[in-house]
Image (cartoon, rainbow, N blue to C red):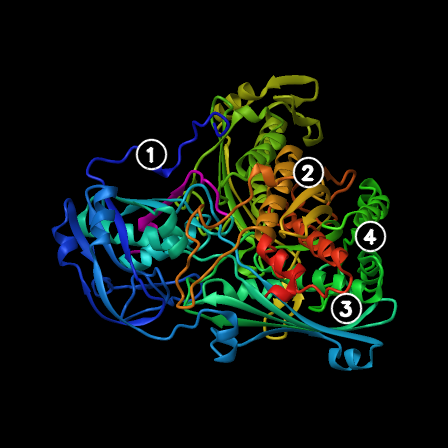
Amino acid sequence: MHVQGSAKYIDDMPEPNGTLHVAFALSHVAYGKINSIDIKSAKKSEGVHSILLAKDIKHLHIGAIVHDEPILAVNEVLFFGQAIAAVLADSHENARRAAALVSSDIKELEAIVTIDQAMSKKSFLDEPLVVSTGDPSKAINSAQNKLTGNLSIGGQEHYYLEGQVAMAIPTEDNEMVIHSSTQNPTEVQHLVAHVLDVPQNAIEVITRRMGGGFGGKETDSSQLACICAIFAQQCARPVKSRLSRRDDMLLTGKRHDFVANYEVGYSNEGLIQGVKIDLAARCGYSLDLSKAIVSRALFHADNTYYIPNATFTGFLCKTNTASNTAFRGFGGPQGMLAIENIIEEIATSIGVDAIEIRKLNYYQKNTKNITPYDQVIEDNIINELSSELIEDSNYLIRRKNISQFNKENKYLKKGLAFSPVKFGISFTTQLLNQAGALVSIYRDGSIHLNHGGTEMGQGLFIKVAQVVANEFGVDIGRVKVSATSTAKVPNTSPTAASSGSDLNGMAAREACLRIKKNLTEFAVSHFSSSKEDVRFQDSMVIVENKKIPFNEFVSLAYLNRVELFSNGFYKTPKIFFDAIKQKGNPFYYYSYGACVSEVIVDCLTGEYKLLAVDILHDVGASLNPAIDMGQIVGGYIQGMGWLCSEELKWSDSGALLTTGASTYKIPAIGDTPEHFEVKIKPNISNHENTIHKSKAVGEPPLMLAISTWLAIKNAIYNADNNIKTGLNAPASFEQVFFNLNKNLK
């Protein structure tokens, strides 16, 4: 369906008769006191049915962790583009026209926009988070070498193809069906029930598919669903809303931008003895998921390196910007970039290839295998994976060739870099590591599957369907996956943290095993056989020497009153964490990968081109190699966009300036290299008991793109070995130019 273009999204659904539409009026300042909001002209506009202000909403505040986000601004506006009024009209166009007529008198106040401003004014959403081990101050002071520095790490817009969209349809008995493009149907259900003041069982949230999410629809989808539901309850009619690209970018959060300040002590050989890293994150005006995101950044500030003495401190900066939220990697990429930059700085200071510094500091298998948060790494394969990629990519030969090229060319310089990835898999909020599924077999042998995961183009539905088909030994065409619904599987976790297949695959398998137990017991009784003689394979049920087509066997079981449906439940084992001490086992296992990137830079303009990428990535025993390969490629490209071209800009007063494709550059096909070699590490499986020994693949590949940013940094250094590059992320052409020509700043 997706290939053919016939897949239906919410905006493709036929609208029920009488459907009304919502649009928002947005604030034009970043921070200010609301003196008045004038809706008179808007009310007179064509097709307008109703207009809501904050004072009209009984339960105004929502939020992912705490209810600190007003659906509409009340008394003051807290970021540029905050919704101050909601307009209900008979068409999408009329709603937008009317919303544009809402005027406001807002006394503008001094906004806190940047991380530096927040740090200087001590504007925080919560206390700092600290992950620490050993005595880093002592280790740094006694080290043979020391370096300090800072790194600015930019944010990233999700830029999903399908924007935020929701439709609320009132039904009988004060109930309501919500169609929402969300990664988190249960949270939408809970918050809609909250604002409507009804029990959660009165709200059914349905998500058939999303046109992309990347974390941007984990929490931000709730505001739209809630406002549609409020209007729908008031007027007893279906209500729909979809955001324009500009409004979507203004209203919703991004990947958190960070500022990293670091101090490191190391030996003459490059062995890290102590590290201090302060990671300050621009969180926005409310908490959202920032605490968990900053926490994960701290958990990944070690990446693949054993650091016996380390303190990683995370600051949750409160700013007058839209509240930043989940984004593929969930803080991990920012923490990882900080330590990889340190590794490169150490290598430059000593005058050796950074690969040697990495190998020297890698976690080992039986020693040097404890993280700063006290988790023992039981599955470390980074040494062998790195060696394989270095050999397969001809890294050492290319390094020599590039050195020769750079000697012969004055204005064109090449850069080459290698970077590894170790990414922890599990929600760091323990309660989210659970999932449910419902499997039903009908009399004709067809199978129906429903689970709590959502499909956003990542292939989750087909993977879980494969699990079900495999358990019953039938062709996958026999399995139909229905839309995710809170009425079928309750209390679901968001589809995030790369956990979709792990959680929902295991829950679906558990449901299948319960049904198979029923069918096996029936076969034993009916055919006077033993359990060992009953097998499900090749669309047959084999009982000793009898081969019975699966559909016939199921029909026979039904006639004999055998239960043919079951729920399944799964919770991730072995994970625990003390949030006060910041110690424990927050992750079930780790996924690994490595990447080699080569770039060429024009020193006269700062322009660069990615020439070659070689990737080797660990997905365990893959459930579906084609899907996993697509995730690796897509993750890398998205990471490349974050680190190279996708630059968010705000005015000094806090207005977001990059609000569409004309001002915000996502990667295009021309940005990909001609040489793009991607391999899944063969002959390996997960050491933990995951679904068929597979590993998560949603987030980890994004961080492979760090090698591209490092390659650009390497090219700048190759242009002039005296340059101490202060390259930040993203490495836009302009930034590269000014790094090459610091005297022009």
Near-viewer residue (524 or 500): 500
Given the image, on which type of amino acid does mark 3 rest?
Ile
Q: CA distance from mark 2 to mark 4?
A: 21 Å
Residue to which mark 3 is pinned: 307
Q: CA distance from mark 1 to mark 2?
A: 34 Å
Identify the mark nearer the N-term, 3 or 2: 3
Residue to which mark 2 is pinned: 622
Given the image, on which type of amino acid does mark 4 rest?
Asn
Residue to which mark 4 is pinned: 383
Q: CA distance from mark 4 to mark 3?
A: 16 Å
Residue to which mark 1 is pinned: 13
**Residue at 44% across / 54% down in the picture?**
658
Q: CA distance from mark 4 to mark 1?
A: 51 Å
SS for dot 3: loop
Q: CA distance from mark 3 to mark 1?
A: 54 Å
Q: CA distance from mark 3 to mark 2?
A: 31 Å
Q: Position of residue 159 (x, y in %)?
A: 47, 47
**Residue at 42% across / 57% down in the picture?**
657
Near-viewer residue (586 or 210): 210
**Residue at 82% across / 44% down in the picture?**
398
Given the image, on which type of amino acid does mark 1 rest?
Met
Give the left or right position of residue 228, taking residue 315 as reference. left
From the image, state whether disc 3 or disc 2 is nearer to you.
3
Identify the mark nearer the N-term, 4 or 1: 1
SS for dot 4: helix
